[in-house]
Image (cartoon, grey):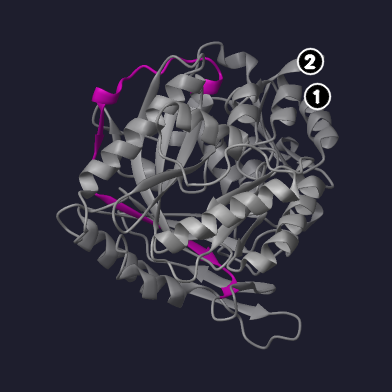
Amino acid sequence: MQLRNIDRHKVLIANRGEIAMRVMGACRRLGLDFVCVCTAADRESGHVRLARELAGDGAVHTISSYLDANEIFSVADASGATAVHPGYGFFAEDFRFARRVVRRDRPMEFIGPSWWVIRDLGDKINTKRIARSLNVPTVPGSDRPVYSEIEADEIASSLFEFQASQGIVDGVIMVKASAGGGGMGIEEVGDFNEFRSVFRRIRNYAKRNFGDEGVLIEQRIFDFNHLEVQVVSGRGGGQHVHFGTRNCSVQSTGKQKRIEVAPGFAPGVVSYTFDAARVLSEITNHSLAMARETRYDNVGTWEWIITPRGEPFLMEVNTRIQVENGVSAVISRVNGQPVDIITEQIRLALGEPLRYTQEDITFEGVGIEYRLVAENTANRFTPCAGTITRLGWPERDWLQVHTHVPTDRPYEIPMEYDPNLALAIVWGNDLAEAKARGLEFLDGLVLEGECGGSANEFYSNVEYLKAKTGKLLEF
């Protein structure tokens, strides 16, 4: 498939690692030219090698930081890029960056939602207000930024009292930076006497990292499952579809996802105390209602928590492509054909129409995505510094592996970034087959390394992933 007016588009990929590689693949499928960036620490990354293989040495530009917007724009101008794909992280949800892309003297296309959509949904409190106006259930707590300690104390006290009235002996509340995301700027508090110091700490963190002291105070819900709805919308905000749900409940102690499963529940296969099919329908309908209300206009994810009683609460909206987009894509079909969500994101951002409706989308089987990480899961998921000496896996027609780690030579893990090594996406006809294939992949995986520093053993999370596979989609 090629875009109209293709000759005027060149995409600057303002990211690194596997997401940069997947964006390159999408550009190739669409017939688009691209350039990428890398830092000194990333010169041996697979995304640099792939860019050179596909587009030559001129497609790689060295910068000092992925977070230096001026450097990004300098590369864009030098290379003649007409669009910027931010990937995830870095500038992906920075509305000021997105606004600058489209408003500068030499404007470009931002491959993501419009900057005002990112601004309006990037604030958790504003998102909660929008949700409540549509009768979308949200987590009990504040629905506007809290700056005053007196007001914060009143909210915290009421939430502890509410939990006590529900029979919760050891109540816990969450204190979050309202402009944060990705599990950052969040702390749990189980004692009202500790609340004020935590509130001050999060408020200072929010000001330092996001330029806004606004704090969100919410009830902590225990034993929940973390579900997501993958939404895709056309530019202009008039067309909206979903590519199903996924379950992201297997997470590190820092609330970073480690396994994702699509669809998000398995009604009739796993025993639930509630109507799981109804809950999946509810969160999907609520997510699409908010997309219509906000005139959402690209790829986005609505994140939910579901209690053991089947009560859904909206947490936030991620206005970007997510790491786990591929596990939704692997079960999705458009008019019977496979779909790539990153390709759709680029195509729609550059002005192409959606071309299909929800009725054209079907779902087949079950997908599982494993995040392979160099970390010590027994020691609070501590990152492992060192060198990957061997990485390999048996090829299967039901398996996709996305990695920036070279498989033909040693690779030093750059500790400037998260120690993510690879994503493996497994497909099966049903949950049982997907889990069996997942374990087959993990058992056949070769992942060896040498740990640097004072540690004498290389750590990865492979055994942890194996242990979690058996209980997927359960509470």
Q: Residues within 10 Å of mark 1 (few under 14, many from 20)?
A: few
The secondary structure type at the circle numbered 2 is loop
Question: Label 1 belongs to which residue?
Answer: 77
Q: Residue 414 in the image: state x and y as whole percent.
A: 72, 63
Q: Classify residue 291 by image quadrant.
A: top left
Identified at 66% across, 43% down, the residue is 52
Of badges 1 and 2, the one in the foreground is: 2
Magenta span includes 349 = yes
Q: Residue 390 in the image: state x and y as whole percent.
A: 55, 73
Query: Which numbered dot is residue 433?
Result: none
Front one among 254 and 373: 254
Question: Label 2 belongs to which residue?
Answer: 106
Callout 1 amino acid: Asp
Q: Is residue 416 left or right of residue 410?
A: right
Q: Classify residue 326 by image quadrant.
A: top left
Identified at 82% across, 40% down, the residue is 68
Q: Residue 97 in the image: state x and y as whole percent.
A: 74, 30
Residue at the farthest bottom position? 456
In contact (CB < 8 Å): disc 1 and disc 2: yes
Magenta span includes 50 = no
- Magenta span: 348-376
Rendered position, 143 above or below 268: above
The secondary structure type at the circle numbered 1 is helix
Can residue 382 be seen here? yes
